[in-house]
């Protein structure tokens, strides 16, 4: 058939594709059009090896003693038995996932119940289940996708609690807009059952439909903004949040969980009496402490289920023994209306009429009545609250998602991709189902990590538990004691505080502000405090690394004795100022003051600013400081050279800037070398050798050596020799031009007229290294004189005086080379 395709082997397919493909034990599946047909896999057999690829393999087969079968015969091979240890590991992993999923589900449920109580509890407590169900459905829709596709370990979806106050303000706006004759916000404690007679079913239906439309639109807009931020790569900057801000944010989450745990555990008893509230809080704290201790004595995945079962059975036993005690009235269990708990799934309109008759519509979905009851005018009035929720919620979710990269550095989390997933799968898609938007749950994530659950299974199971609760109703949650909910939140919050709370003023400030206001304001203040702290630390360190002159610091070029002595006398004319670190508003004043003292205290001609040790970015204050430096240099007749920055005359390195300043100083101060008139009988070699001698402050001539040299000319950027070439066994005397001796790409020496190359090879020969260790390249038009070693050895016998004079020149050359190297090393040590 045309549409028939055969899939062989178990391939890695996406989760939605695996929903529509059938795989048998053998891993084969036939997909025919839109129908799927299962085929039986052939038995697992292995053909006996009949034609080995080598004689060694055939010989090994024959030695095994196995029977040689015919071509059509086959031999079955027994499958290896699964070891009992492997099955135990799988069983233990399964129970870890179940335990972690149960704990995560309970934490998610108590967060949703608390959120629903703050959103609609003071309006109509019978509508708490509407908010809880919308949150559970959103978790079920988004959780499975995030568990399978996200790079975050233990990815579990949950409503961000930062939306709770905004959702409460949104619900109150909708309530006031949907009530016809009374705009008072009722409370369960003050008015009780009066609310059920004053507010009609029609008004409640209008409120539910309007609230769902407004909240869905808010989460839809938030999802679009998050998806745009992720697709445009705008959230990667969150990865570079300062560490105190990230630590303070995570510690603030722990403080918030501790507060919620204390409130959930003690609030029911506190309404009866304060001692009873203190008792329930102490019981929750003791249970949390016992839970942490049990994880040390028994496997962690058993601690939470055992305590949960013990708490439920203990309360039921106490209620059976003391029949007069109502667990709901004393604050042990949630006090929910029985009529509310009968509703399941999407049934916010299934309420009793005023005459007491019940009209249930279990067979109809809410969408059949949804658009008829929406008050679009009220939805439009909620635009301000929705816009604030979008802005604040998006910033908070982006920051929390960005901190996951620091929380799991080995997971290779792409923050932009995760924010995009949260925007589309966590907010846009649930909003289309009239559900609440989702984000990553830090509380459930921490629980799963503590219990050692698998990174993907716990998210799927938790989502399925939320889906089952949404389908069957939230009545099962009322049987779990409130102090057990509080113990889970206290344990989790303490773990966050113990892990991330550091003894740092910025971290404590973030935690305090988060507890007093909200997490978004705390993060903003934390970023500002970190910037201020960094600026103060940088301003406390001097931006001036060193101040030198050309007397104490030289370039790497080798000067002849005449030039070196002149630089020793006039070196103070070159000022070298080395900067380091950040040049910004906190250090710019020090730079300006130092330059002002430098150019006004002594006369000079050249000012070199070396900024190669500074970071490449400058603020407007630093740019203004450089402009003032340039103006002061010009006013005091200084030429400003800058290394590593586009200001004044620029050079690639500070060494080049010093070399340029030395050349300029020598050109202005050194009188021109008298050139003798060339006579017809004087050869070119003799004239060039005499110029080389004059560059070395030698006025007398050495005719015997001049007769032994040969002239070589090189163009700019032409190689004299390359690293690895055979040694030439001759001196190279620089008569004109400039050369660089390179070790790979690094400049080792700079050579000018009067220098000599290959001096050490004559006096300190190394037979083990017959090749050149460096590369010599001409920077300008260069003239060299080649003086072979053999000629010098011959002169030592034939003309000893000439040989001794040349040896003295080489000795002074080596001495000058060592001195120049020491002066250049000072500047090199400043940079390293």
Image (tube, helix red, strand yellow):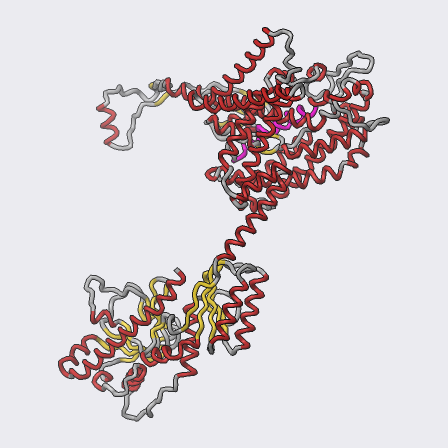
Residue 292: in magenta span: no
Report how many numbered discs are placed on residues in the image. Answer: 0
| Residue at figure coordinates x 24%, y 31% from the top left | 55
As displayed, is residue 546 above or below residue 175? below
Question: Could you say where residue 155 lies in the image, as x and y percent from the top left?
Answer: 54, 31
Does residue 14 appear anywhere in the picture? no
Side (left or right) of 129 relative to 570: right
Q: Which quadrant of the structure image shows residue 553?
A: bottom left
Residue 132: in magenta span: yes
Side (left or right) of 51 relative to 531: left
Front residue of this view, candidates 77 and 757: 757
Question: Could you say where residue 635 lies in the image, as x and y percent from the top left?
Answer: 55, 77
User: Residue farthest to the front?
Assistant: 275
As displayed, is residue 23 above or below residue 552? above
Q: Main secondary structure of the magenta part?
A: helix
Q: Which quadrant of the structure image shows residue 226?
A: top right
Question: Could you say where residue 274 lies in the image, as x and y percent from the top left?
Answer: 64, 21
Quadrant that contains the C terminus? bottom left
| Residue at figure coordinates x 40%, y 76% from the top left | 571
The magenta segment is 130-151
Does residue 580 appear anywhere in the picture? yes
| Residue at figure coordinates x 24%, y 75% from the top left | 811
Front residue of this view, candidates 478 and 682: 478
Q: Which quadrant of the structure image shows residue 782?
A: bottom left
Question: Could you say where residue 236 lies in the image, as x and y percent from the top left?
Answer: 56, 45
Front residue of this view, candidates 93 and 15: 93
| Residue at figure coordinates x 56%, y 44% from the top left | 238
Quadrant that contains the N terminus? top right
């Amino acid at each position: 058939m045309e549409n028939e395709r055969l899939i062989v082997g178990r391939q890695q397919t996406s989760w939605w594709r695996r929903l529509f493909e059938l795989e048998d034990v053998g891993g084969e599946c036939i997909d025919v059009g839109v129908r799927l047909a299962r085929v039986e896999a052939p038995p697992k057999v292995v053909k006996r090896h009949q034609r080995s690829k080598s004689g060694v393999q055939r010989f090994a087969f024959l030695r095994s003693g196995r029977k040689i079968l015919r071509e059509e015969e086959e031999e079955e091979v027994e499958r290896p038995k699964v070891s009992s240890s492997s099955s135990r590991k799988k069983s233990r992993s399964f129970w870890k996932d179940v335990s972690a999923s149960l704990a995560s589900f309970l934490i998610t449920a108590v967060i949703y119940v608390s959120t629903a109580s703050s959103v609609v509890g003071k309006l109509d407590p019978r509508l708490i289940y509407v908010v809880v169900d919308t949150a559970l459905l959103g978790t079920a829709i988004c959780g499975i996708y995030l568990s399978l596709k996200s790079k975050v370990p233990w990815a579990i979806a949950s409503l961000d609690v930062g939306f709770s106050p905004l959702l409460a303000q949104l619900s109150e706006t909708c309530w006031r807009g949907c009530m016809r004759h009374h705009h008072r916000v009722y409370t369960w404690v003050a008015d009780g059952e009066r609310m059920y007679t004053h507010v009609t079913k029609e008004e409640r239906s209008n409120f539910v439909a309007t609230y769902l439309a407004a909240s869905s639109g808010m989460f839809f807009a938030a999802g679009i903004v998050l998806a745009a931020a992720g697709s445009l790569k705008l959230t990667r900057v969150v990865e570079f949040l300062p560490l105190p801000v990230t630590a303070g944010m995570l510690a603030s989450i722990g403080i918030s969980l501790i507060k919620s745990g204390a409130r959930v555990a003690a609030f029911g008893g506190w309404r009866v009496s304060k001692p009873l509230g203190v008792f329930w809080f102490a019981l929750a704290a003791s249970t949390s402490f016992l839970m942490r201790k049990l994880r040390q004595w028994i496997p962690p995945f058993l601690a939470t289920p055992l305590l949960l079962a013990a708490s439920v059975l203990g309360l039921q036993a106490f209620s059976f023994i003391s029949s007069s005690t109502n667990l709901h009235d004393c604050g042990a269990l949630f006090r929910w209306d029985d009529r509310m708990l009968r509703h399941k799934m999407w049934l916010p309109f299934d309420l009793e009429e005023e005459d007491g008759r019940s009209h249930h519509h279990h067979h109809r979905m809410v969408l059949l009545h949804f658009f008829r009851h929406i008050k679009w005018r009220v939805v439009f009035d909620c635009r301000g609250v929705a816009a604030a929720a979008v802005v604040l919620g998006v910033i908070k979710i982006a920051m929390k998602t960005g901190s996951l990269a620091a929380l799991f550095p080995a997971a290779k989390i792409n923050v932009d991709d995760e924010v995009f997933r949260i925007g589309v799968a966590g907010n846009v898609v649930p909003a289309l189902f009239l559900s609440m938007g989702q984000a990553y749950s830090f509380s459930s994530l921490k629980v799963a990590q503590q219990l050692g659950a698998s990174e993907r299974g716990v998210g799927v199971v938790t989502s399925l538990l939320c889906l089952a609760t949404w389908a069957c109703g939230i009545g099962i949650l009322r049987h779990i004691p409130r102090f057990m909910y509080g113990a889970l939140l206290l344990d989790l919050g303490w773990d966050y505080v113990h892990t991330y709370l550091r003894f740092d003023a910025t971290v404590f400030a973030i935690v305090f502000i988060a507890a007093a206001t909200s997490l978004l304001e705390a993060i903003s203040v934390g970023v500002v405090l970190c910037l201020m702290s960094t600026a103060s630390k940088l301003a406390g360190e001097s931006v001036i690394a060193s101040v030198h002159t050309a007397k104490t610091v030289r370039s790497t070029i080798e000067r002849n004795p005449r030039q070196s002595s002149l630089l020793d006398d006039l070196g103070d004319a070159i000022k070298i100022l080395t900067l380091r670190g950040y040049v910004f508003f906190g250090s710019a004043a020090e730079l300006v003051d130092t330059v002002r003292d430098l150019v006004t205290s002594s006369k000079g001609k050249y000012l070199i600013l070396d900024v190669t040790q500074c970071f490449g970015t400058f603020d407007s204050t630093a740019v203004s400081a450089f402009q003032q430096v340039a103006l002061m240099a010009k006013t005091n007749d200084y030429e400003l050279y800058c290394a590593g920055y586009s200001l004044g005359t620029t050079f690639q390195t500070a060494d080049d800037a010093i070399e340029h300043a030395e050349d300029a100083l020598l050109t202005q101060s050194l009188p021109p070398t008298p050139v003798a008139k060339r006579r017809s009988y004087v050869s070119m070699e003799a004239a060039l050798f005499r110029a080389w001698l004059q560059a070395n402050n030698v006025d007398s001539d050495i005719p015997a050596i001049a007769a032994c040299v040969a002239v070589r000319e090189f163009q700019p950027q032409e190689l004299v020799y390359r690293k690895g070439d055979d040694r030439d066994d001759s001196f190279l005397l620089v008569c004109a031009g400039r050369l660089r001796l390179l070790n790979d790409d690094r400049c080792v020496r700079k050579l000018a007229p009067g220098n000599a190359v290959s001096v050490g090879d004559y006096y300190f020969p190394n037979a083990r290294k017959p090749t050149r260790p460096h590369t010599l390249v001409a920077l300008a038009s260069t003239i060299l004189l080649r003086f072979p070693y053999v000629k010098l050895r011959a002169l030592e016998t034939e003309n000893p005086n000439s040989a001794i004079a040349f040896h003295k020149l080489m000795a002074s050359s080596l001495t000058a080379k060592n001195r120049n190297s020491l002066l250049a090393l000072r500047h090199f040590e400043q940079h390293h």
